[in-house]
Image (tube, grey):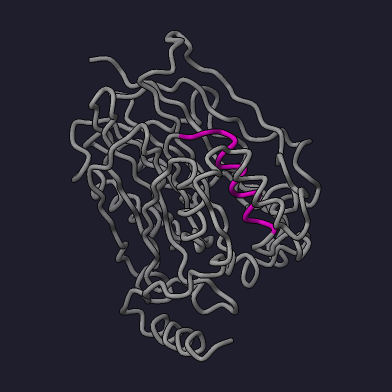
Amino acid sequence: MILQEIVFIIIAKLIIAQGTLRPVPGLDRQDSNLEFTPEMNSKDSLLNYCYDINEHGNVGRHGIRREYVDWDLSRNSTKNTVRVLQWNILSQALGQNMDNFCRCPLEALEWNNRRCSLLEEMLTHEPDVMCLQEVDHFDFFNRALATQSYTGIFQPKPRSPAIAMPDNNGPDGCAIFYNNNKYEFHEKFEYDFYHLSTEECPSRQVALLVVLIDKVSGNRFCVATAHLKSQKGEKEACLRNNQGKDLLSFVSEHAKNCPTIITGDFNAEPYEPVYETMCSYPEFKLNSAYNEPGGEPDFTSWKIRQREGECKETLDYIFYTPEYLTIRSILAMPKEENVHEDRTPSFVYPSDHFSLIADFFFNEN
């Protein structure tokens, strides 16, 4: 490790201890040896390049089989629609050092092996907008996805725990990528949650909001994403509920009278107060894309950890304004028999959370 990195990690640990400053991304260069060229402008050419340099070759390619569920096909055209992907992709530093995935092979957690599968999951479904959490290799995704006409925006967490981990690549945070052929960037807004945690230190969680304009229709819409407080317990659930209220206040300030989508890893099951808070906000009514019909899925995250054992949970959501948007289809969670007995992450699937994808119609005026 070079002297500069040693100094950075020492400073980062002090920042976490003091809880007063936002870390400056400085180590996001683990993929600097990769060269993404304009010739990689197809999904296959980009993925072939990534898998060709992967130590394990094509291991994990094509992921876990999943199916789309159609809810409203009354309008057959895909014009005036938007496909949104929501995914906690699992921070590399945290996944290797803190999460204790005791049934996952160590090689499957290595970044050089995971990055190919992460890209494939994103690109296979050709989303218009991608909302990601636990991103600690933004430079890799930004350069790779640029070949597929995506533009990325990144908000690192203040006091990210990732920067104290060995061989980290800088702080993790939230990112939004959008198809720049289809949408024009209008503006962005960032939010740092300020509620105190049970350890009496400022929160590390963030929210990011982007306003986009459809280049054909001229319609403006807002997409926001957040990553709320983790851990179990009544105090943590109360904190998440307060963060949900703050998130809604933040979004409503910048998303007046336009289609709005809020995604994220809320670290909360549907029975927690924050879920009801999200669906009952007086400023604008929100629905959950995966709650129509029949309730939320049985899981969006399925993992086995050393201490907690098997954790099968519904933690991730795509909320939207039904006044302006109608669900066309969603990507269903995998069937249980298609999830490996060692669960996730694995060579087959690179994160402990499954991606959510929803197709929306923009309602006609």
Residue 112 horizontal side relative to residue 2, left or right: right
> Residue 113: horizontal and vertical position, in percent?
70, 58
> Residue 301: horizontal and vertical position, in percent?
61, 47
Q: Quadrant of the N terminus?
A: bottom right
Q: Nearer the viewer, residue 286 or 192?
A: 192
Q: Nearer the viewer, residue 137 or 181?
A: 181
Magenta-drawn stretch, dominant element (helix, strand or loop): helix
> Residue 307: horizontal and vertical position, in percent?
70, 67
Q: Which residues are magenta?
A: 113-127
Say which quarter of the image contains residue 155: bottom left
Q: Nearer the viewer, residue 178 or 100?
A: 178
Q: Nearer the viewer, residue 290 or 70?
A: 70
Residue extending farthest front: 39
Q: Quadrant of the C terminus?
A: top left
Q: From what the image shows, is residue 142 above or below residue 335?
A: below
Q: From what the image shows, is residue 143 above or below residue 3?
A: above
Q: From what the image shows, is residue 42 above or below residue 90?
A: above
Say which quarter of the image contains residue 90: bottom right
Q: How many marks?
A: 0
Q: Residue at 55% across / 42% down in the picture?
A: 122
Residue 108 horizontal side relative to residue 17, left or right: right
Q: Residue at 26% across / 41% down in the picture?
A: 211
> Residue 32: horizontal and vertical position, in percent?
53, 67
